Image (cartoon, rainbow, N blue to C red):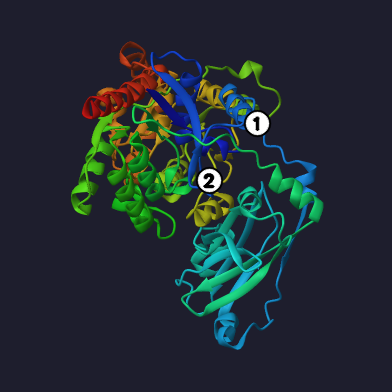
Amino acid sequence: MAIWIDVTTSLNWNRPPVGIVRTELECARYALAARFSQATKLCYFDKSAGEFRELSKRQAKKINNLISGLYEVKQSSLTREAYTVSSAAQGKKGPRRWAEFASRIKYSLDSVENGLIRGWAAKAGNPRDKIEIVFTQDENIVARTMASQYRDDLARAGIGGGNCAFTMPLADLVGSADPEKTQRLDVIARSGRFGRRRLGTIAFDKGAFRFLTESQDAGPIVTFSREDVYVSAGLDWDNKDFNRIYNLKLMREFRVVGFCYDLIPFFFPHLCVGDVSSFFSRYFTELSWCADGVVCISECSRRDYKEFVRRSGCALPETKVVRLGSAIARSSANGLTASPVAEVIAASKYILFVSTIERRKNHEVLYKAYVKLVERGIADLPKLVFVGMRGWGVSDLFSDITLDPRIKDHIVVLNDIDDKELSALYENCLFTVFPSLYEGWGLPVAESLGHGKYCLASGAGSIPEIAGDLLDYLDPWDVQAWANGIEALLEKEYLESKEHAIRERYQVDEWSACVDGIFEFADKCGVRQVRASA
């Protein structure tokens, strides 16, 4: 029996690992350390071939570098020079039967960034109609996606409500194309049976194209045995085909363990970008029929998952709750070189909020609370530091922060922070805040407590599971309560009493315990399969 850890998400990741990616990498770390009695191996899902593969030497090196924190985004000069992206003229007419559609579609095929073909497409007068983007080589489709991603710049320009962008990894196109055919890929927008328009082309240098297609190295195909267990903890809704995985499972009789981090797009679709509710529903339905076990990261996420299964009428696999690890390498500001993080720490006292900056995380309530604190004339009001990538639905918030003279000098936004810098920010802050509208866990709350720092948190979703009565929980919508809560914590003795309780009672969740729980559950699924087939 072997436990196979899927690292597909990590192989496609080009930034410091966070959240779901960190969970997948921690599973890989302990699998490589061979600390379990069962054989543990790494694999990834080759979507173009519909097969699982072992890692090539290059891929194994990337995973090891990600685990050790050494991975940096690098783009070879060959890849930069190997292709030319050109957008078709907006006014050019296609075949007559497509002319009406072509005249109504507005689009752009943009430059390549971080190995991604980028662009957008929307119907004039009917921006809610979603458009499929297909990439063809000699009329054969090599890849497809939907123009449904959100971009702030499109929203500001009033284009498709912002939800009409698309991306496609260049590596996926190269890996799916045939080096013996035309070295040109056409990018085409489609809608319905008769709507079609060419958006542009991606032309490759012939020698470079052959090199790129042949250098997409892949490990050998994995042939699971009936005693094996496959564990996937990544962003499966982006990287997997669970219908295909289900068919492989029927043929080879291995066991499948999946993950449920949250079902926010299903229960709260208004808090998510685009039409992801139906997308998530389909994914979790397929997972439920395919999986023998599902790991949930909180009791809240397990309740939500069981409710989803009840409403959907699909099968309910066995479930287990495993708390995510929250330990990150502790670091002080002493070792930091000159950087925005070092400047923030050195400049003044500050309150910290770690999270992707998007609507669901509710940064707006903090902005409004800070306006109230400024208007109250609070002396020496600390800066409010937001740490996270900019997401969707926050263009108005950023505009307010930039233009509001009452607040613009009080809020700092940081991005691309590694673990060392993040730990230093936790270590030196006064306290943290986390006003999220809903969570499946709430890792920044646990990380804050792990650094001995109090967190003024929302009581939504799973957050109270992390620390129980060690924290005070606020209504995420109550601006007055957040202003009052922050002001109270500026009283030194009150804050110290909160921190004392954390030091005395809070137990940090180690990643080793988290992975142990995952592997024990996987082992249980495998043992049940062996007994059933005996």
Q: Quadrant of the N terminus?
A: top left
Q: Nearer the viewer, residue 298 or 57?
A: 57
Q: CA distance from mark 1 to mark 2?
A: 48 Å
Q: Nearer the viewer, residue 1 or 122?
A: 1
Q: Amino acid at mark 2?
A: Ile
Q: Is residue 37 left or right of residue 184?
A: left
Which of the two marks, 1 or 2, is nearer to us in this view?
1
Mark 1 vs 2: CB contact within 8 A? no
**Residue 121: x percent and y percent?**
57, 68
**N-term mark: 1 or 2:** 1
Q: Is residue 44 above or below residue 489?
A: below
- Secondary element under disc 1, as helix, strand or loop, is helix
**Residue 104: x percent and y percent?**
56, 81
Q: Where is mark 2, residue-wise?
A: 407
Q: Is residue 488 above or below residue 336?
A: below
Task: Name the disc covering residue 58, or none.
Answer: 1
**Residue 96: x percent and y percent?**
60, 88
Task: Name the disc covering residue 175, or none.
Answer: none
